Image: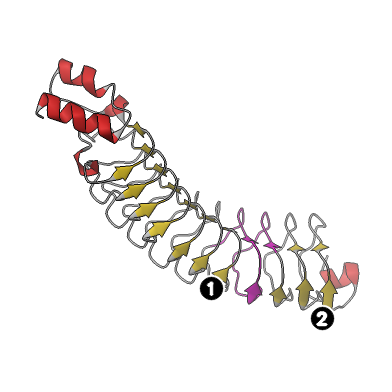
Amino acid sequence: MTFKEKYGDHSGETYKGNLNISNQGLTSLKGCYSIIDGDFYCYDNNLSSLEGGPEKVNGDFWCYSNNLTSLKEAPKKVNGEFICYSNRLTSLAGTPKIVNGKFSCSKNKLTSLQEGPKTVNGNFNCSNNKLTSLKGGPKTVNGNFWCYNNNLTSLEGAPEKVNGNFWCYINNLTTLVGGPKIVNGDFYCNNNDLTSLEGAPKTIKGNFWCNGNNNLSSLDELLDSDIKGTIKAIKNLEVPTKEDFKLFKKVKSLKKYKAIKKLRNV
């Protein structure tokens, strides 16, 4: 069923307020309003395209849980959130370059962030895709940046500063080169293939988790970092002697790590 068949033809018209047409079994947005002066919700339908949908949405735009393979017919301007997770997207072409709320494209089939938004004034979530790189992604993220559970081998392309948490766990990272320099929340890089913490942020205002990296034997790359929270790394840290191991088990902060290194002269 199309929008036109269910609601009539409103092409070229403006809808005042929020429009919720979610979970209606719609297969097409043809006949929809051109401007939504509020939020627009079309999630949980059977849409394979956004053709015929609004050109401008003055609030949030939620099109998640459909069968979308492309966003080329998405609104050119969205003044709130842009939520397109749980579709079949292979590209972000068609998305606005500036998103004034959160942006979520998780649980799709993306291999690249090229042609996606460049500024996100909320959270940015690209987790649970098939990404091998962050190149082409946003340069400004004023919330959390979540890229966990992908196929990333590098953090090249990440923003230099993230104003929330940065979660890149469950990938194929061997170093943190290319990642953000400043993270104003937690930094989680656990469960990767890290052999070194080279490229770790210089400032982390929250916690730092690098546990679950079986080939990681040192935290030395953190010595020049300012980490306000706790460090979780010990379960898989290999150290030279049993005595060293007992000491390293107590590491929960960078200050304590430095003290132990000085004490043991390792």
Q: Secondary structure at mark 2?
A: loop
Q: Which mark is residue 212?
A: none
Task: Return the x and y of residue 114 as percentages of the image width and height.
Answer: 44, 69
Which amino acid, mark 1? Lys
Task: Specify the quadrant that holds the N terminus.
Answer: bottom right
Q: In the shown orientation, is residue 12 left or right of residue 260?
A: right
At 43% from the left and 43% from the top, the residue drawn is 186
Distance between mark 1 and mark 2 Cα atoms: 25 Å
Q: Which residues are magenta?
A: 60-89
Q: The residue under label 2 is which amino acid type?
A: Ser
**Residue 75 is covered by the magenta coloring:** yes
Outermost residue toward the left in this view: 265
Q: Is residue 64 above or below residue 235?
A: below
Q: In this rendering, is residue 2 above or below 240?
A: below
- Residue in the picture at 27% in, 41% down: 194
Question: Does the magenta run of residues contain 85?
Answer: yes
Q: Residues within 10 Å of mark 1 (few under 14, many from 20)?
A: some
Q: Nearer the viewer, residue 227 or 88?
A: 227
Where residue 136 sits in the image (x, y, percent)?
41, 68
* Numbered-mark total: 2
Q: Which residue is mark 2?
A: 11
Answer with left or right where residue 183 lies relative to residue 254.
right
Going from the N terminus, do you reach mark 1 or mark 2 first? 2
> Where, by quadrant of the figure, is residue 29 drawn?
bottom right
Q: Position of residue 132 (x, y in %)?
A: 37, 56
Horizontal placement of 7 versus 30: left or right? right
User: As rendered, which of 77 and 26 lies closer to the eye?
Assistant: 77
What residue is pinned by disc 1?
97
